[in-house]
Image (cartoon, grey):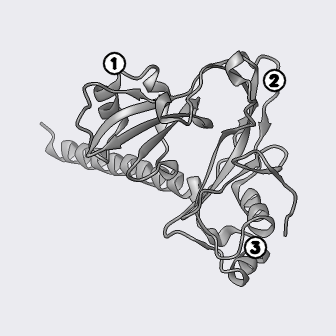
Amino acid sequence: MDWRRAKSVLIFSFLLLNIVLGYQLWTEWRERLNTAVDWTSLPPETLQFMRDNNIQVVDNAKIPTETPAMRELTYIFKQRAGDSINDRVAIQQTPETRFVFNQQELANALGGVVPELGSYTLDWPASKEGVYFVLNRMEGAWPMFDINLNLYYSEQKIRAYAQDLVEIQSTTGVKEQQVLPATKALAKVIERNLPAGSVIKEIRLGYHGEIFDDAEAEVLQVSSPSWRVLLENSEEVYYVNAITAEVTTEKGEVLVNPK
């Protein structure tokens, strides 16, 4: 055997392996860098407004950078969860549930109990500690903020659930449009709508739209690409239409620079 040649081949192989691994690490680092930026990326005038009005953000909060092309969704309700405790569906054999769980653990525990469970993903910021977990109905990679599955729990057991079930309609012919960047949506909400002393805990892209009162009668509903802005220690939720830049609240109120 030609050991000198074999040694050269091994050295070349290790060098090639290091190059491949280095490229993978660089790619992962670049992807993480591009998926979120910090709050200093906001316009200088917005940052100054935040300082003047004591508007803060929670530690380590990031601003998403994705600006995908999205279209409006249309859907009808198959089932709509009510606000009354009587609208909750009791779970007879309440599973032991850790407060930190993944989708697979949830599917194993409740997959045979809750319909279409695999179509919902945990929305931790919108959940109410000590009362219920909120899961959003997903459409592709994006949550439908208005279509929820609430899991009510006590003593580390999920006791009941309330669920919205929808049927997504065909979007053939509906044009996709690139969404407004999160930085622009945030700047508009901060400067025009947030009260002094607000603490922002999250901004997230998904779908939001007004729900008609007669939704249970299979009336067609429309949900638009929207940025959701959540505040710390506040039940107020702001939505910025990611196409038109219109700002609304959870109650559907249109905000026109109230300050």
Residue 242 locus on image (x, y percent): 76, 46
Q: Residue at x 56, y 36 (%)?
A: 83
Give the residue number, with chain letter if any, for mark 2.
174
Q: Residue at x 67, y 68 (%)?
A: 41
Q: Is residue 109 left or right of residue 44?
A: left
Spatial separation of the CA atoms under disc 3 and disc 1? 49 Å
- Amino acid type shown at disc 1: Gly
Q: Which SS class for mark 3?
A: helix
From the image, which quarter does the N terminus lie in?
top left
Residue 17 locus on image (x, y percent): 32, 46
Circles 3 and 1: CB atoms closer than 8 Å: no
Along the line of sight, which residue is nearer the eye, 128 or 125?
A: 128
Give the residue number, with chain letter if any, for mark 1.
112
From the image, which quarter does the C terminus lie in?
bottom right
Spatial separation of the CA atoms under disc 1 and disc 2? 35 Å
Name the N-terminal-most of marks 3 and 2.
3
Q: Is residue 42 left or right of residue 145?
A: right
Q: Is residue 129 left or right of residue 249?
A: left
Spatial separation of the CA atoms under disc 3 and disc 2? 34 Å
User: Residue extending furthest left?
Assistant: 1
Between disc 3 and disc 1, the foreground one is: 1
Along the line of sight, which residue is nearer the eye, 88 or 195?
A: 88
Q: Residue at x 66, y 80 (%)?
A: 54
Q: Rate crowding at label 3 as few (under 14), some (14 to 19) or many (20 or more) other CA atoms within 10 Å.
A: many
Give the residue number, with chain letter if any, for mark 3.
46
- Amino acid type shown at disc 3: Thr
Q: Which SS class for mark 2?
A: loop
Name the N-terminal-most of marks 1 and 2.
1
